[in-house]
Amino acid sequence: MIPDHSEGQTPVDEDEMEGLRIKTITTQAELNDFEQLNIDQAAIWVMKNHFTPGEIMTESFVKKVHSKMFSKVWRWAGKFRTTDKSLGVDKFEISQELRKLLDDTHYWIENKIFSGDEIAIRFKHRLVSIHCFNNGNGRHSRLMADILIKDVFNLPVYSWGHEQLIKPGEARYTYLKAIKAADKGDYIPLIAFARS
């Protein structure tokens, strides 16, 4: 299988492809479908449970959520990447940068530095920029934001444009534009998109 990828997606390299659990997958569309089934199960798990800030703000929880989302498709699900990518911090800095993010977010929550939506979206944005995993970082960061907004702030989970953002289209274009604004410190478009 030679997967294709859209703008803003991290391509899966040959070594990572060795971690594919379902060897009958031959196209990117099939891979997307199997991943989405696994992600849907993880989302059900999230909705059925309640997590405290102390649980959420740990490296082990970040890994657990990724594993829940992708472990039926990838052997490396829930494990930090061991190679560098065109996005994200150096592979040796992942744990350190994640710890900083978790500490910052805990501080924002405790001291009510921003609104609940802004905390969840800032967390999501920084988490995806660290790029902890080989793949699935955007989808993982969105589910983590949903967990924060639901369990810490008692607000409804995000709609994320009501579409799967892995496929090219208007919603993905708007999302990537909002990400670029957040890269420059303007979180308003990303918050608006998350709630659209």
Image (cartoon, grey):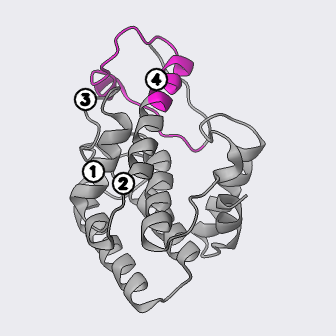
Residue where numbered disc 3 is placed: 75
Please say whether residue 83 is visible from this viewpoint: yes
Locate the N terminus and report the quarter of the image it occupies. top left
Percent x, y of residue 193: 70, 59
Mark 3 or mark 2, earlier in chain:
2
SS for callout 4: helix
Q: Residue visible at 27% across and 25% down?
A: 19
- Disc 1 from disc 3: Cα separation: 13 Å
Residue where numbered disc 4 is placed: 34
Percent x, y of residue 116: 53, 77
Residue type, numbered disc 3:
Arg
Mark 1 or mark 3, earlier in chain:
1
Q: Are the residues at dot 3 and dot 2 in contact (C-beta closer than 8 Å)?
A: no
- Disc 3 from disc 2: Cα separation: 25 Å
SS for callout 1: helix
State which region is magenta.
Answer: 8-37
Percent x, y of residue 172: 68, 45
